[in-house]
Amino acid sequence: MRRRPSPPAPLPLGEGGQEPCEGCEPSQGSWPSYLVLARSGELRRRGEAVYQSLSNCRLCPRLCGADRLAGKAGLCRSTAQLVVASWNLHHWEEPVISGAHGSGTIFFSGCTGRCIFCQNYPISQLGHGRRVSIGELAGMMLELQGRGAHNINLVTPSHFIAHILLALDEAAGRGLRIPIVYNCSGFERVETLRLLEGVVDIFLPDAKYADDRVALEVSSFPGYVEANRAALAEMYRQVGARLELDEAGIARRGMIIRHLVLPDELAGSFEVFRWVAGNLSPDIHVSLMNQYFPAHEALHHPLLGRKLTEAEYERAIEEFFDAGMHAGWNQDCD
């Protein structure tokens, strides 16, 4: 029988799965960790400091130095004006993220990448979206929680970290109590990720490539491999490899790495898996995705101008196990 990444079994949380009693202080491991920072004032202090740093923005590995506070766009195509493309309950994430009620996803406009196959390029590269205030972002989080979301899922968030920290501070004061998912490309700066320690409960990064030349040609990411691996190591340091689930099987804390298999082995899947197993942990859950199809500028690319084949995806599954990994999810082939 074909070996497949298997979903994780729920891990007992003990007191960590219980809601805090009235008047009790939340603590690390027992309730979303950002509540601790919000009550101490640290969340707001971090947010204000990061916001001021936008006058010489160095949030991502590009270090472009744009004065976003003066209205100049960085290489992420964003100024200091917060732009949200959409927010809604999303039912098609990994099972431990979506659960029965859905993940409360907030899609931010702009991106530090330029993927030629991007399926969301009107949002990521053309900047489509709605300008909102920090208070409105906090309101979105609370609305999603009120609609039953298992978590707040921040999609492509890195260039708006300042706004997110400030919105979380406000939302926590108004009753936000569900975990935060940081859903990103994996092209992150370690110094920026450290600002999220004690804020993010679940990291959901991509590990897109094992070859810098491919990353630059396909996504315009300079030095992707080094930046990505340093970022994954920092996320691992913050939350570890153990994916903690509540009694209903919903993730409360941990890390899931996403890897999109590309045609002609352009993603370097085996090298990605081998690095994760050898340098982080073989226990990290990986979401192995087969949903690639040519979009945006990839339609006429000599290698990316076609769909992924079933054989290519099957090979990636085998490489996953050959690299020593064992936990995660795969997708059915059409």
Image: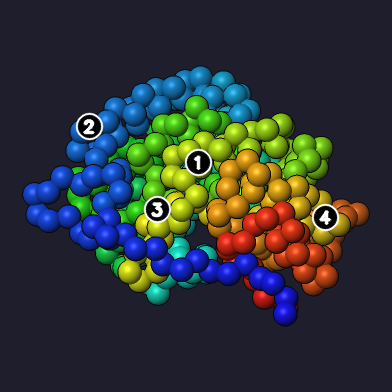
Please name the residue that numbered disc 3 is placed on. 253
Q: Nearer the viewer, residue 204 or 220?
A: 204
Is 331 left or right of 107, judged from the image as shown?
Answer: right
| Tag 3: amino acid | Arg
Secondary structure of the residue carrying numbered label 2: loop
Image vertical order of residue 37 relative to residue 270, above or below:
above
Q: Are marks 1 and 2 in contact (CB under 8 Å)?
A: no
Q: Nearer the viewer, mark 1 or mark 2?
A: 1
Label at residue 75: none
Percent x, y for residue 84? 46, 49
Please name the residue that numbered disc 1 is placed on. 235
Residue at image location 58% in from the left, 62% down from the top: 327
**Is residue 301 in sight in this rendering?**
yes
Label at residue 41: 2
Percent x, y for residue 124? 60, 47
Label at residue 265: 4
Percent x, y for residue 195? 41, 32
Q: Nearer the viewer, mark 3 or mark 4?
A: 3
Is 204 left or right of 262, judged from the image as shown?
Answer: left
Image vertical order of residue 158 relative to residue 1, above or below:
above
Compute the Cα span from label 1 to label 2: 23 Å
Compute the Cα span from label 4 to label 1: 26 Å
N-terminal-most mark, 2 or 3: 2
